[in-house]
Each structure stands twice: as structure tokens, then as C-alpha cells.
Amino acid sequence: MSAPRVTIYSRPGCHLCDVAREVVERVCADLGEEYVEVSIDDDPELRERFTDEVPVTFVDGRQHDFWRVDETRLRRALARS
């Protein structure tokens, strides 16, 4: 099994994070991709880096979006290999 292509950096109790997770879950399920979610509150460096931007999504190790996930844009990014 390969590593997840999508990472969501989030924090507990974040409404935008919940919405972003729903979009990422749907897109990944449709495309057969995996994702991982990381709480920035568990890592001081991540908390400092992303404090005001969560949720932040990365695709293939590169920042893709923050605050909101555009479903069409995410599908296009994952269609590229």
C-alpha cells in the first residue's frame, strides 16, 4: 500500500476542518486515494506554522489549499500522477 497522497492539517473543534474533511473523504473515496489527518495541536512547530490557516491540505507533499477545499481543484490535482 502506498503512502496517502493527501494530508489535512487541522485542529479539534474547527468547523472549517470538518467541512474540508468531508470534501477530502468524498474525493479520495471516489478516486481510490488515501488521506491522513494531522492535528496541529499535537506538534508545536505545526501549530506555529498553521495557526490561522487551518485546515491546510497538502497533495503529494505540496500545499494545496487552506481554509476551504475546492473539490474540483482537488480532483484535478489527484488526477495528475
Image: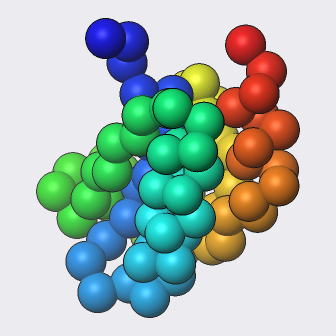
Give the quadrant of residue 53. bottom right
Q: Can residue 50 be seen in this view?
A: no
Whether residue 56 is situated above or below residue 20 in the rendered picture: above
Residue at 31% across, 71% down: 11
Give the quadrant of residue 65. bottom right
Residue at 30% across, 59% down: 40
Q: Please state, as top left, top right, bottom left or bottom right, where the N terminus lies in the image.
A: top left
Give the quadrant of residue 4. top left
Considering every residue shown, the one lying at the far front of the view is 30
Name the foreground residue: 26 vs 42: 26
Whether residue 57 is situated above or below residue 79 in the rendered picture: below
- In percent of width and height, residue 39 lies at 27, 59
**Colouring mode (rainbow / by chain / secondary structure / one colour):** rainbow
- In percent of width and height, residue 3 lies at 37, 18
Q: Is residue 6 visible?
A: yes
Name the foreground residue: 23 vs 65: 23
Q: Please state, as top left, top right, bottom left or bottom right, where the C terminus lies in the image.
A: top right
- In percent of width and height, residue 69 lies at 67, 64
Residue at 51% across, 32% down: 32
Taking the image as shown, residue 40 lies to the left or right of residue 14, namely: left
Whether residue 16 is situated above or below residue 24 in the rendered picture: below
Residue at 58% across, 45% down: 30
Q: How many marks?
A: 0
Taking the image as shown, residue 59 lies to the left or right of residue 7, namely: right
Considering every residue shown, the one lying at the far left of the view is 42
Name the foreground residue: 37 vs 75: 75
- In percent of width and height, residue 54 lies at 50, 69
